[in-house]
Image (spheres, grey):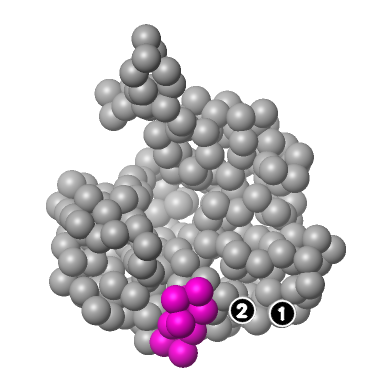
Amino acid sequence: MKNFREILADDGIYVFDGAVGTRLYDKGVYINRSYDELNLVSPDLVREVHEEYVNAGADIIETNSFGASRHKLQSYGLESKLREINIAAAKLAREAAGTKAYVAAAIGPLGLRIEPFGPTSFDEARDLFREQAEALLEGGVDLFVLETFSELSVIEQAIRAVKEICDLPIVAQMTIQSDGKTTFGTTPAAFTVQLESLGVDVIGLNCGMGPTHVLTGLEAMRTVTDKPLSAQPNAGLPRDVQGRQFYMGSPEY
């Protein structure tokens, strides 16, 4: 397979997998447990989800590690297994991907309030991101996906942490609300300029309020950058139609 940066230069369209947690839930995993721990206690199940996406044609699959940072694992008494969980996440994805797909190390927000809005310093945040990134790197990944961030200052620490340990490509994804901005009021155009200045390889949007909002945000982002863009919308919120709840962002849509 080509280096991931080489395929970015081809200016093609590449397809990510879908939600890992949702598929695990569909397979009977209750929501009151750590899905990241499944890398250790139910590896076959996690590998199965990855394989389903590879077989469906995904070009890139993400590790099951979105919440595998120290603070989030601490909620389940699993912080001592951080390294083990993240290494396993990378290895399981690699086993499923083979030579058919790239493996992206998935890292989400820390679940902590960062200065000036909370007690966690930028240095502390960067250290927390770094220890997770180091374990994922040890497990073997092709790129990093930093996703579902709403604070620029926080994703900046994640970017810096990854860059301190390796030169792998970085996909940096923010999430926006119904008003088209982050929860802190930053527009897609504004955070795109900032993320580009930090030297990431791909800038994108994920989660949020569904495909329509993501598309509108990407259109604004394209006006300020020539960088590759990524889009990973969720289904949005259900809409009431004559007393019934429907998700308007269907696969057909």
Q: Residue at x 55, y 29 (%)?
A: 213
Q: Residue at x 70, y 54 (%)?
A: 151
Tag 1 near tag 2, CB within 8 Å: yes
Q: Secondary structure under badge 1?
A: helix
Q: Does the magenta stretch include residue 80?
A: yes
Q: Position of residue 183 (x, y in %)?
A: 69, 43
* Image side of residue 21 versus residue 100, left or right: right
Q: Which residue is drawn at 29% across and 59% down?
A: 30
Q: Circle 2: is it few (<14), some (14-19), or many (20+) Cα within 10 Å?
A: some
What are the residue bounds of the magenta stretch?
A: 73-81
Position of 182 relative to 110 (above/below)? above
- Tag 2: amino acid: Leu
Residue 201 visible, this orientation: no
Q: Does the magenta stretch include residue 194?
A: no
Position of 239 relative to 6 (above/below)? above
Q: Circle 1: is it few (<14), some (14-19), or many (20+) Cα within 10 Å?
A: few
Where residue 212 is drawn, which disc sits there?
Answer: none
Q: How many labels does the image show?
A: 2
Q: Position of residue 130 (x, y in %)?
A: 59, 79
What's the distance in space between the residues labelled 1 and 2, CA to CA?
6 Å
Q: In which quarter of the image is residue 114?
A: bottom right
Position of 159 relative to 245 (above/below)? below
- The residue singled out by tag 2 in the image is 128
Nearer to us in this view, 146 or 65? 65
Quadrant into which the N terminus falls? bottom left
Q: In which quarter of the image is residue 248?
A: top left
- The residue singled out by tag 1 in the image is 124
Q: Where is residue 229 in the image (x, y as percent from the top left)?
A: 53, 43
Q: Which residue is drawn at 65% across and 50% down?
A: 150
